[in-house]
């Protein structure tokens, strides 16, 4: 089992040369990330999903809104998650107006909701976005199947006082971009997390990534990065795998030999017979 590390970062374009093959894949594996919430992807619909592929991970994406297409820098959000995880995207009413992606993640029997949001500088729907986040969160928490809701993304200078005064708590309150706190991680269940820290990624961006360590464990998976020689399994886990394989092999061998192996009763009678025979001599 491994800690379900999550990361939130503004990458300022996934279209940069060698972004995937060298930097982003290395950051995900080196930091043992299971869920990565990416803002400012700068991706457009003409870019295929194959362009985003990272070995051992799947992805969901929501590209730049048409209403923001006149922006020079672009926007867009996406979510990377390990291929061993069960993640489903869903679209609450009204989300099409914003650069936001909602996803359901199931850890064992519990349902967790995650969302990645980007609030572009200069747009005028800030209050509407906050109301959307608030209303959707309230409706989700009324569902007995939902265990927690976590909001990640670059919210710029968006006023989120409504969220913080009601259902959300903030996991990290430090600076993430020069002298400002732009990247945010809010959750309705802060007691589920051990820590939240910032780190500088090898990916070329002037934003710090926020990495959180929830108190939730995921099934371990044997993944290898093509560019980083590092297994995502511990030595103890590997030992358990080999022990299970040896036990399975022995069990299979005994199954094949069963027709020629005497039953325990027959074997006991044979031992008694041999003992009596030795005494008679």
Image (tube, rainbow, N blue to C red):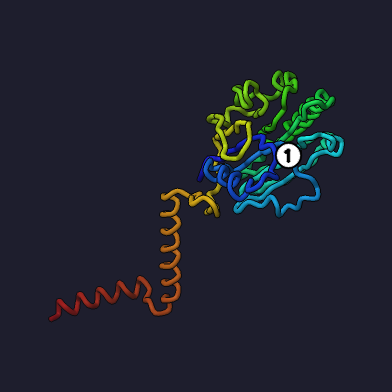
Give coordinates of residue 63: x percent, y percent.
78, 42
User: In which image quadrant can residue 111 be found?
Assistant: top right
Give coordinates of residue 195: x percent, y percent.
54, 29
Q: Secondary structure at mark 1?
A: strand
Residue lying furthest bottom in this view? 281
Q: Nearer the viewer, residue 124 or 235?
A: 124
Asked whether residue 59 appears in the rendered view, the answer is yes
Residue lying furthest left in this view? 281
User: In which image quadrant can residue 108 be found?
Assistant: top right
Point out the image quarter for the C terminus.
Answer: bottom left
Give coordinates of residue 207: x percent, y percent.
63, 31
Residue 22 as seen in the image, left or right of residue 62:
left
In the displayed structure, would residue 233 be above or below residue 165?
below
Residue 64 as seen in the image, left or right of residue 81:
right
Residue lying furthest right in this view? 67
**Residue appearing at x 74%, y 44% in the figure:** 61
Q: Nearer the viewer, residue 36 or 241?
A: 36
Residue 260 as seen in the image, left or right of residue 143:
left
Q: Residues within 10 Å of mark 1 (few under 14, many from 20)?
A: many
On the image, numbered disc 1 is attached to which residue? 77
**Residue appearing at x 76%, y 35% in the figure:** 73
Give coordinates of residue 184: x percent, y percent.
66, 28
Q: How many marks?
A: 1
Asked whether residue 214 appears in the rendered view, the answer is no
In the displayed structure, would residue 120 be above or below residue 274?
above
């Amino acid at each position: 089992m491994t800690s379900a590390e999550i990361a939130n970062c503004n990458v300022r374009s996934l279209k940069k040369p060698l972004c995937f093959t060298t930097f982003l894949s290395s950051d995900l594996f080196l930091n043992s990330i299971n869920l990565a919430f990416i803002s400012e992807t700068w991706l457009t619909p003409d870019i295929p999903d194959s362009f985003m592929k990272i070995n051992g991970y799947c992805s969901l994406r929501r590209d730049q809104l048409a209403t923001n297409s006149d922006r020079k820098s672009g926007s867009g959000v996406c979510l990377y998650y390990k291929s061993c995880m069960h993640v489903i995207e869903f679209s609450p009413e009204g989300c099409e107006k914003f650069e936001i992606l909602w996803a359901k993640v199931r850890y064992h029997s519990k349902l967790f909701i995650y969302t990645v949001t980007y609030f572009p500088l200069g747009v005028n729907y800030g209050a509407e976005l906050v109301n959307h986040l608030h209303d959707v969160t309230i409706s989700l928490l009324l569902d007995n199947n939902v265990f927690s809701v976590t909001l990640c993304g670059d919210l710029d200078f968006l006023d989120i006082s409504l969220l913080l005064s009601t259902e959300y708590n903030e996991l990290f309150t430090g600076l993430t971009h020069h002298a400002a706190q732009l990247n945010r991680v809010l959750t309705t269940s802060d007691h589920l997390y051990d820590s939240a820290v910032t780190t500088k990624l090898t990916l070329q961006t002037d934003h710090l990534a926020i990495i959180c360590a929830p108190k939730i464990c995921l099934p371990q998976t044997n993944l290898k990065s093509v560019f980083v020689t590092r297994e995502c399994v511990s030595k103890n886990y590997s030992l358990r795998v080999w022990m299970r394989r040896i036990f399975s092999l022995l069990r299979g061998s005994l199954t094949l030999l069963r027709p020629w192996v005497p039953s325990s009763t027959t074997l006991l009678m044979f031992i008694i017979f041999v003992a009596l025979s030795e005494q008679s001599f």
